[in-house]
Amino acid sequence: MKVLFLTRFPPERDGVGDYTYELVSYLKKYCDVFVLTFGDGEEELINGIRVFRFIPQNSFFKGYVVSRLINVLNENFDFDLVHFQTASFTFDRNFYLFPLFLKGLNFVTTLHEVLTLRQFHYLPFVINVYRRSKRVIVLSLEEIRILTELFRVRSSNIVWMHHGADVNVFNPNVSSRDFRERYGLDDSFVILALGFIGPGKGYDVLIRSFKKVSGRMRDAKLVIAGMPRRGTEWYFNYLKALVEWFGLRDRVVFTGYVDYELLPSCFVSGDIFVLPYRGGVQKSGPLHRAMASGRAIIATDLPGVREVIKHGFNGFLVGPNDVNGLADALLLLYNDDGLRRRFSVNARLFAEKYLDWGKIAYKTFKVYEDVVGC
C-alpha cells in the first residue's frame, strides 16, 4: 500500500509536523509512506521516507496548486490514498480547497484542532474537507461530538485514537544531565512546562501560581521550554515582564526552542510537568511525552486531558485559570516524594498501554485497509 501524507514536516518547528514524523516512522513498517510538504522543490529521503518539499509557501491559489501536485505525483507513484493532517494554525483557508480538484483519490484526515466560531472564516473550507474524507481521525472523544452535532459528519466515518508518544525514546531511564547542564539547573527541583508559547497555554497562570509558593519551594525553579508562534511574541514578552515584576528572574528559566535530540533529557529533568492550558478540547503531544517519560503531572481539567489524566491516579487536574488550585497542587507534589513516584509510575504504565506509537501506527494502517477496501 502507498500512502501520501499532506502535512508540515521537520525540520519545520511545528507540532503537526512532529506528530507526522513520529507516526510515519512507525507506519512505514506496514506500508510505503511518502510526504508532500512545503519547500522550494527539493526531494529528499528522511529515515527511509520519501519527502517532496514542493508546496510553495506564498501561492494564493494554494488549494489548486496542492491538488495539481498530488495528481502529478499520483501519476508517477499510484498512491492508494492521501492522509491530510489538518490544523488552521498550520494551513491557510484556501489550502482546504484541494479535495475539489483531486482525481479519484481517497483521502483520510486527522484533526489536530477543532475550529470554534471565532474561526468562522475557516468553517466552510474545513467542513468541505471533513465531509469529503473517507475517514476522519480524531485525537479526542470530545471531537466526535463536535463533528457529528455541529458539522454533521457521519459518526461511521469518524475514528478515535490517542495522540501517540515514542515510549522508547521518551522513558524514565534517560539521563537528565545534558539538559540540566545546558541550562544551569544543577540539582534544582524543576517544574517544567513545554510547548509553543501563546496566550492559550496559560503560562502566566503558572507563573502566578509559582510566585505564591516559591518561598516554600526554596530549591525549585520553573522552566518554560519553547518559543512563541509568529504573532504571539507579545505574550512571550508579557511573561518575561511578569517574571521581572514578581522578582523571579533567578527562579524562572526560558529555554527557547529545544532541539528534538535534547527533548528526552528535557522531560526527565522535570520533577513536575505542568500543562496549564486555558481551554478548548486540548490534546497535547508534550503531555503524552511527559507521561511516557514517567513525570508527575498537573494539567488543566479539559476534555482531551481527562482522557489520559485521571485525577489522583496519574496526575492532578485543576480548573482553567485556577491560580490557587495550581499553586496548591504544586506544593503538595513538591512535599510528597511518594505521591510523585506513584503518579510517575502510573503515567508511564498508561503511556505504554495506550500511547505507544507502534500501536497507534497499526491502528492507523487498519483504517487505511478499511478505506481502500471500501
Image (cartoon, rainbow, N blue to C red):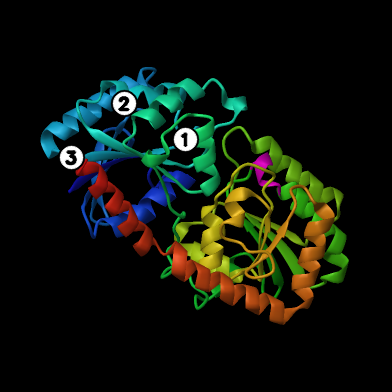
In-front residue for pair 128/277: 128
The residue carrying mark 3 is: 79
Q: Which of labels 1 and 3 is toward the front?
A: 3
The quarter in which the C terminus is drawn is: top left
Q: Secondary structure at mark 1?
A: loop
Q: Is residue 7 visible?
A: no
- Judge the density around disc 2: few (<14), some (14-19), many (≥20) Cα neighbours within 10 Å: many
Q: Residue 199 magenta-drawn?
A: yes
- Judge the density around disc 1: few (<14), some (14-19), many (≥20) Cα neighbours within 10 Å: some
Q: Which mark is residue 90?
A: 1
| CA separation in Å, label 2 and label 3 | 15 Å
- Identify residue type, mark 2: Pro
In the image, which residues are magenta? Answer: 198-202
- Judge the density around disc 3: few (<14), some (14-19), many (≥20) Cα neighbours within 10 Å: many
Q: Which of labels 1 and 2 is toward the front?
A: 2
Residue 49 horizontal/vertical position (percent) = 25, 51
